[in-house]
Image (cartoon, grey):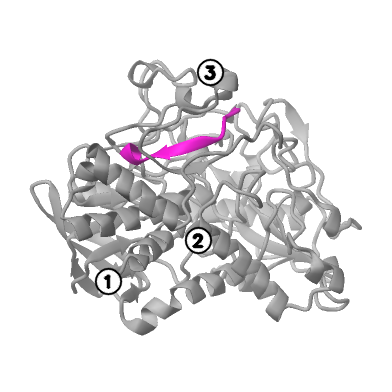
Amino acid sequence: MQAEILVVGGGLGGVAAALGALRAGRRVVLTEEYDWLGGQLTSQAVPPDEHSWVEQFGITASYRALRDGIRDYYRAHYPLTPAARAWRELNPGGGHVSRLCHEPRVAVAVIESMLAPYRSSGRLTVLQPYRPVAADTDGDRVTAVTVEHRHTGDRLTIEAPYVLDATETGELLPLTGTEYVTGFESHHETGEPSAPDTAQPMNMQAVSVCFAIDHVDGDHTIDKPAQYDFWRAYQPDFWGDRLLSFRSPNPRTLAISGRTFTPNPDDDPLSVVADQRVSAGDGNLWTFRRIAARKLFTPGSYDSDICLVNWPMIDYFESPVIDVPDPDTHYANARQLSLSVLYWLQTEAGFPGLRLRGDVTGGADGLAMAPYIRESRRIRAEYTVVEQDLSLAVRGDKGAVSYADAVGVGMYRIDLHPSTGGDNYIDVGSCPFEIPLGALIPRRMDNLLPAGKNIGTTHVTNGSYRLHPVEWNVGEVAGALAAYCLNHGLTPRGVRNTPEHLSGFQAQLIRDGVELRWPDVSGY
């Protein structure tokens, strides 16, 4: 097959990359390994982690269209109460983690609707479920990528003048010989206050396999998982208790603290204000990532709330899944951990009425289709974002570094989960930050662009740049940049390092609804 722009990976970054390129008039082939487009928002089943100003500013226009589309879908198709329907900032789950907690399938429907006109016109071809297995290169250029059908093993080779890596783990980087880094860089290399003295390339954030549950009458206990006895006894040194317990380190203070778990509490979801500047919101695990609050729907519509389990106890930090001999074994172990958590909740914790809702998450075993990947391979970039660029402790009231080549904005604390090297949480306050174009440009390759969590961040700053709206912004810019390069006969490096083209590209992004600078947020 041939395309003008090939996007490998159909997560949030990949979908946004396709939209950015299609909007500029280019023809795109988009591949995705799983049955749902949308990545962490859908197949990984993670409600959006966003900054506190998301309803006013700080996201791209197309990401706002996605969020608005999710709310409109509920209003059009779900039996909301009159009060919920009138709620301008409708939060269907009434969850504390985000101002928009929702069921994954709704995001799938909205994403598909955003892509539908381009599919109909023939300018977009989507290949599912295909994953990359090989690539051809000619010097500093990628000439083709071979993808393999997840079930049948059939292969397709796709040629394109521009190739975007939007996979969750940066799969194209080793396949194309693109220089990259994994894990924790050293303090000597980055100067970061939180970095270790020596590099730890295999020290990466835990992966998690999420799942959805409700709580109804009856005994819905699953079969005892094969690895249950192992995980029941598992106790990391820094955890303060067994992993399978309601006690764990506070992500910000590291103090060992207990969480509550109260299925279907008698709360008012209309009154929930999700503001992680004030609190992480994980005190009650049921409402933390609740994705359907029964009280927002007409009586009898839902037998129970639906709770999305992405809690500390499902983090798998026994091994990384990147650049290891058998990653599938570790993915399987992570799934066993999640099933063991559910079994523990149903048996020892005393909640047999918990029911696994695989119909909500789409996974054949009742869990999410795909593992939640927090940390990818990352390109060796023309510019690498380091902790000193956005740390509140370092920058103070100066705010984050403002880049001449800014192509977007984001905001989230530097939030690192326990890692495969034995590190506890690392949490650093951050300033509202910008996304530099230099972080999207590999030092050597001319036509390969990152379109997700594989940009030029460090292990530390990935903790801020890995969230939903930033991944979307990165992907959208990567797609627009590839199209701009084709339209003007330039390389991405040429766009960044030629003042008139950099300003021209930034002006195009602004016209397309990409915010490049933060307003004054001191009064919010």
Q: For the magenta stretch, what is the residue range?
A: 428-439
Q: Residue at x 37, y 79 (%)?
A: 119
Q: Earlier in the sequence, mark 3 or mark 2?
A: 2
In the rendered image, the quadrant that contains the C terminus is top right
Cβ–Cβ below 8 Å for labels 1 and 2?
Answer: no
The answer to which of 269 and 59 lies nearer the viewer is: 59
How far is disc 1 from disc 2 in space, using C-alphas? 19 Å
Query: What is the number of the mark on residue 414?
Result: none
Q: Eyeballing the image, is 362 above or below 236?
A: below
- Residue 403 in view, yes or no: yes
Query: Label 3 neighbourhood size at 10 Å, few (<14), some (14-19), many (20+)?
Result: some
Tell me where residue 246 sits by quadrant.
top right
Image quadrant in which the N terminus is located:
bottom left
Residue picked out by circle 3: 394
- The local secondary structure at tag 3 comes to helix
Task: Report the mark closest to the observer, 3 or 2.
Answer: 2
Residue type at mark 1 is Arg
Residue 62 is tagged as 2
